[in-house]
Image (cartoon, grey):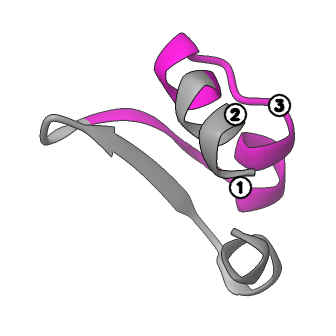
Amino acid sequence: MGFAREVGDQLVFMDGGVIVESGDPREVLANPQHERTKAFLSKVL
């Protein structure tokens, strides 16, 4: 995730083939807006 945060211009989080959240990697990783994104990040960060 650190790599994505540092080098990415856009981060897209998908679940079941559907885009759940997208945006600036720093913003999505630091302040996710959707519960599914929050649940995933709480397990991997």
Please provide percent x and percent y for residue 8. 65, 78
Q: Secondary structure at mark 3?
A: loop
User: Closer to the observer: label 1 or label 3?
Assistant: 3
Please say whether residue 35 is one of the residues in the magenta stretch.
yes
User: Closer to the observer: label 2 or label 3?
Assistant: 2
Residue holding disc 3:
31
Please say whether residue 23 is one of the residues in the magenta stretch.
yes
- Image quarter of the N terminus: bottom right
Please provide percent x and percent y for residue 40. 53, 35
Q: Is residue 13 above or below residue 9?
A: above
Q: Mark 2 or mark 3, which has the lower sequence index?
A: 3
- Packing grade of label 1 (10 A; few <14, some 14-19, many >=20) is some
Q: Is residue 9 left or right of residue 5?
A: left
What separation in Å lies between label 2 and label 3 (alpha carbons)? 12 Å
**Amino acid type of disc 1?**
Asp
Q: Residue at x 86, y 41 (%)?
A: 30
Q: Secondary structure at mark 1?
A: loop
Residue holding disc 2:
42
- Packing grade of label 2 (10 A; few <14, some 14-19, many >=20) is few
**Cβ–Cβ under 8 Å for marks 1 and 2:** no
Q: Is residue 1 left or right of residue 5?
A: left
Q: Which residues are magenta?
A: 19-38
Q: Is residue 34 left or right of residue 31?
A: left
Residue holding disc 1:
24
**Amino acid type of disc 3?**
Asn
